Image (spheres, rainbow, N blue to C red):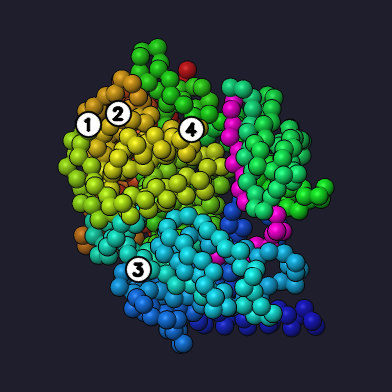
Amino acid sequence: MKKTVVSIGLALVTLGAFAQWKPAGDKIKTAWAEKIDPAKVLPEYPRPIMERTDWQNLNGLWDYSILPVGNSEPSQFEGKILVPFAVESSLSGVQKTVGNENELWYRRTFAIPAGWKGKNVLLHFGAVDWKAEVFINDVKVGVHTGGYTPFCFNITPFLKTGEQKLTVKVWDGTDKGYQPRGKQVSEPHGIWYTSVTGIWQTVWLEPVADKHISGVNAVPDIDKNKLTVNVTGENTQYGDIVEVRVLDGTNVVATAKASAGQALELGIAGAKLWSPESPFLYDLEVSLYAGGKVVDKLKSYCAMRKISTKRDDRGIVRMQLNNRDYFQFGPLDQGWWPDGLYTAPTDEALAYDIQKTKDFGFNMIRKHVKVEPARWYTHCDRLGILVWQDMPNGDRSPQWQSRQYFNGSELQRSPESEANYRKEWKEIVSCLYGHPSIVVWVPFNEAWGQFKTEEIVKWTKACDPSRLVNPASGGNHYRAGDMLDLHNYPPPAMYLFDAERANVLGEYGGIGFPMEGHLWQTDRNWGYVQFKSPKEVTDEYVKFAEILKKFIGTGFSAAVYTQTTDVEGEVNGLMTYDRKEIKIEEERVKKVNREICRSLDQ
């Protein structure tokens, strides 16, 4: 009888939640939108590369209000918003524009589990766009700026007995300020999309000891059969010890201990190398000891792989994976959703685009002017696909600057803008550092906000010397970084060549096909060229692929096709925006893509 009562109670709670939420608006939606339970939104652990067993998800229905800038917390809130979907999205249940003249307020309550007594409680935000002020029980505990990176606050000193109140105030200037914002604009049109404001990744709580692990980065060296693991900690001191164990399944491959703050070096004999064809991951167990006792322990993972460049026997500089020439080929992936905008409706949806990219025969994704939740990169690590990671563009620079191919004019940023760029780009590189799928950093795209290119490239290399840097994908070109990146629409073209760096085609294609019943809008849809059937699109795609093959022989080491899915008014995706239809003849595309990916096999 007790089980029945509990089940009925849970059902009533769920029904109550549904009664307060439904998707807003009448735009197209993905099939996953129908599976959303507002009482259990994105329930998966949000940070698999550094995973503890105990945590609490705070996603779900929160109170919200939109008020002019400068107002105090409202006494009465407007309604309910489904976190973590941005307020402009359908899945938020709100679908309202905020604008730079207003602030978005959130409020909810939560309870601390009894088993967390004596622990510090960390409040985590996966990402909030753009400025977030966080209050616990009406006490301001911290501020974070930056729309693409995780942050957390130790809220332990501000907790009280019983129910806790959490309030968040958000301001976002979108395209009215200097902050990075990717493709977001106040008035969407063409290649520019709906603005995203507020919480758009998971919010969660985690209990930790006073001394605890705050970061784990594993750096492989396949030439020396070595893995270097850097573990950072909070409140550690001399005498505390970090232990790392590397496992292949249940088999312990290597183990090492070091004083907290010291790098650990582990020999990996006969290492299994990671690649898109064989994405093998080693498990890591990381423990922190204080006074001879384990005070923190978590799970992570790593891979043995190397990304580099080398001149081939014809004198062409080639990109290499694990010391072999390796042609990198993949789609431009914007990561937008018709129902969730920046946020995939479910974790299954988040992985779907990656799996389909592999199904299409690609081995790489260029993540275009957006950063994804940590789970997306873990899916790439596990499924096996290379990632080029863009910095989201920003600043109120002209959308299209005239290109002077070498040493062209650059944007003069204000000191505030430049400092913010460096802060946000450093945070992006730091939080994604441990993901082996990422092989290229792209600090600028097509001269959007481009400034001090040579200096920024050197600075990025100093932040992460283990990866390649694409200085400006299709932008003003300087002799810096590891590659020269050309853009050409619609067919592939090589109009410049650099004998000292790898040459890549960072964007081409854009073959359009507006598929009825799957359009964001009924008019103003566009692609660089437009066709009327999957066969016509595929014929053009294969024609471009054959052109690309010739350029591989004369120097290209990578290429990026535009694009994975339709996005709002753009109809040049391999799939529709709602992911319900494949717009190409998949087997024909897979066949030619695999031929391209194998073009440099030795």
Does 81 appear above or below 260? below
Q: Which residue is identified by label 4?
A: 465
Vertical relation: 504 (above or below) 59: above
Eye-nearest disc, 3 or 1: 1
For marks 4 and 3, give the one nearer the viewer.
4
Q: Position of residue 96 (x, y in %)?
A: 35, 74
Q: Position of residue 378 (x, y in %)?
A: 56, 47
Q: Is residue 179 magenta?
A: no
Residue type marked 2: Arg
> Can you identify the residue that label 3 sits on?
27
Pointer 4 or 3: first along the chain: 3
Residue bearing mark 1: 406
Q: Is residue 210 magenta?
A: yes
N-term-proximal mark, 3 vs 1: 3
The reply, left or right, for residue 388 in relation to residue 287 is left
Q: Reading the chain from its start, which is encountered first: label 1 or label 2?
A: 1
Chain part drawn in magenta: 202-222
The residue closer to the viewer here, 600 or 334, is: 334
